[in-house]
Amino acid sequence: MKIALAQLNYHIGNFEANTQKIISAIKEAQQNGADLVVFAELCISGYPARDFLEFEEFIALCENSVKQIAAACRDIACIIGLPTVNSSPKGKDLYNSAYFIENGVVKTVVRKALLPNYDVFDEYRYFEPADQFTCIEYKGQKIALTICEDLWNNIDNPIYKTFPMDVLILQKPDLMINIAASPFAVNHDQERMQVLSYNAKKYALPLLYVNHVGAQTELIFDGGSMVYDANGQLFDELAYFEEQIAYYNIEKTGVKEASVRAEKPLTPNVSRMSKIEQIHQALILGIRDYFKKSGFNKATLGLSGGIDSALVCVLACESLGPENVMAVLLPSAFSSDHSIKDAEDLVKNLGCMSQTIAIKNITQSFETALEPQFAGLPFNIAEENIQSRSRAVILMAMCNKFGYILLNTSNKSEAAVGYGTLYGDMCGGISVLGDVYKTQVYELSNHINRNGEIIPQNSITKPPSAELRPGQKDSDSLPDYDILDRILKEYIENRKSSAAIIADGFKEDVVRKVLRLVNISEHKRYQTPPILRVSAKAFGMGRRMPIVGKYLS
């Protein structure tokens, strides 16, 4: 049996585009002699559809797409993922399902049993877990079809009581297929490989796994679909961050055995993408799909001459093309000459559009208007934030007038400790670096410059500063970023207690200050744009904290 794995980029709720993409892949697979083409989890609706799933019309449109796909599925079979109605009066209204379609007819329905309800996942909010499991019979072979999380319970501390494959293996399948919607995070590819290898080896069956690719607002899907042999050895791995269709021959070599063979000789994967290159490619895909799927094509950002805005400008140019990026220089009375030059040099290196709008007179107008209220009071954060908010007003006016989307340039370290101005530099349609620590910003900038200077070296080496007052540096009020980021990662991503972090060798007063800043800044993060997720624990939908909580504050 020749199987095609279709790793495609879907668009939530865009039924016409998703359906046509699936039908085109079926036709291509058919032309290449495939017997079965496999698509990803919830490919019809896109993932995650969230509360769209609560609309009956949305579910009906999914079924309408199925009819079109089934009509095109002749002399070939396909597996597609979609939400389906639970006909029982008990339980949730929907199932997370997969249809096996052969010659225009839905022959088998498989439902997901293990519904993740942690971090960015919210599936139990919508779906009823399956309690029955049946193999698919096709071309003389039995297929054990599971959906994403259904294979993720075989770990030392399982979080579910059900093991779908333990039931399916009793039906003596010849191979396993797992359709998934597994979002990107640094190192998550390694976790997937461990889980898939474990299952293939445990059940002594070949395993074909297909994932989404593409970004859905903050969630980025990296693809990386895989095939494992019955010994748990990686047989093939599809591209990361790209669409691809690949073909495999599953040959039944005995009553209980099957082997996998590629359509063409494979090139051994001698070197994997580095962590920083993974982040680089993920952010490019995240920006590109956010704009494409939102119907926009032009971006703007405030370019200060600092490293964060320089990096975002580079990523925007790589994603959208420099002709679609407007960098706006907004110097104030406190902007240094070298910062302005660094910003101008970056624009020359990239070839993007740029404009310079000085904000000195604008901020002075605000200060003059507030003189009666501020009389006798010293210059402080109020005047500093007027500068940041003046820049935001100008940038948003540019967006309204010319149809740009504003890219937010704050990094994760700043967002964590509240080092940003609400309605100022925290504005934007999408946060590009909100899940990238400052130390990673430096690493990524050096990675971009690996073949020659794109980001001016001075932007990388100079002490970071918001330049909102004379001689200001980030280190005036924050620990060095090397220390800060390590504390933040232990607290945010590893969920360590203050005592445990202090026991790791960090100074107690620094730890308590940092953790307090994180917790009292929650109200700011609630008002930030969506953040492109590249870590296992990003701010946003996957980290839900109370705003008025007292813990560590």
Image (cartoon, grey):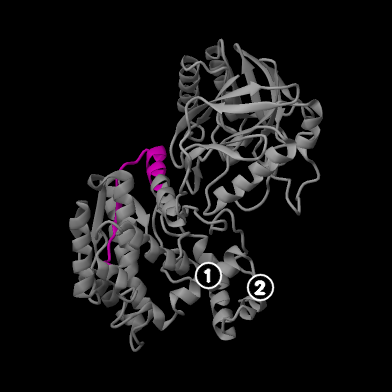
Residue 208: x %, y % from top left: 61, 32
Instruction: Tell me, yes or no, if residue 57 can be seen here.
Output: no
The vertical placement of 417 against 78, above or below, is: below
Q: How many marks?
A: 2
Residue displayed at 74% across by 25% down:
135
Report the side of 351 relative to 61 (left or right). Answer: left
Closer to the camera: disc 2 or disc 1? 2
Q: Are marks 2 and 1 in contact (CB under 8 Å)?
A: no
Q: Quadrant of the N terminus?
A: top right
Q: Which residue is mark 1?
A: 521
Q: Residue furthest bottom?
A: 376
Report the side of 323 relative to 254 (left or right). Answer: left
Instruction: Tell me, yes or no, if residue 254 can be seen here.
Output: yes
Circle 2 crowding by C-alpha within 10 Å: few under 14, some 14–19, many from 20? some
Which amino acid type corresponds to the residue marked 2 in the rendered image?
Ser
Report the side of 40 relative to 272 (left or right). Answer: right
Q: Quadrant of the C terminus?
A: bottom right
Q: Nearer the viewer, residue 315 or 191?
A: 191
Report the side of 543 relative to 344 (left or right). Answer: right
- The quarter of the picture where residue 511 lies is bottom right
Residue displayed at 60% across by 12% down:
104
Residue 324: say if magenta: no
Q: Secondary structure at mark 2?
A: loop
Q: Which residues are magenta?
A: 287-305
On residue 497, the disc is 2
The vertical placement of 207 against 430, above or below, is: above
Which amino acid type corresponds to the residue marked 1 in the rendered image?
Ser
Distance from label 2 to label 1 (Cα)? 18 Å
Residue 31: x %, y % from top left: 46, 15
Residue 293: say if magenta: yes
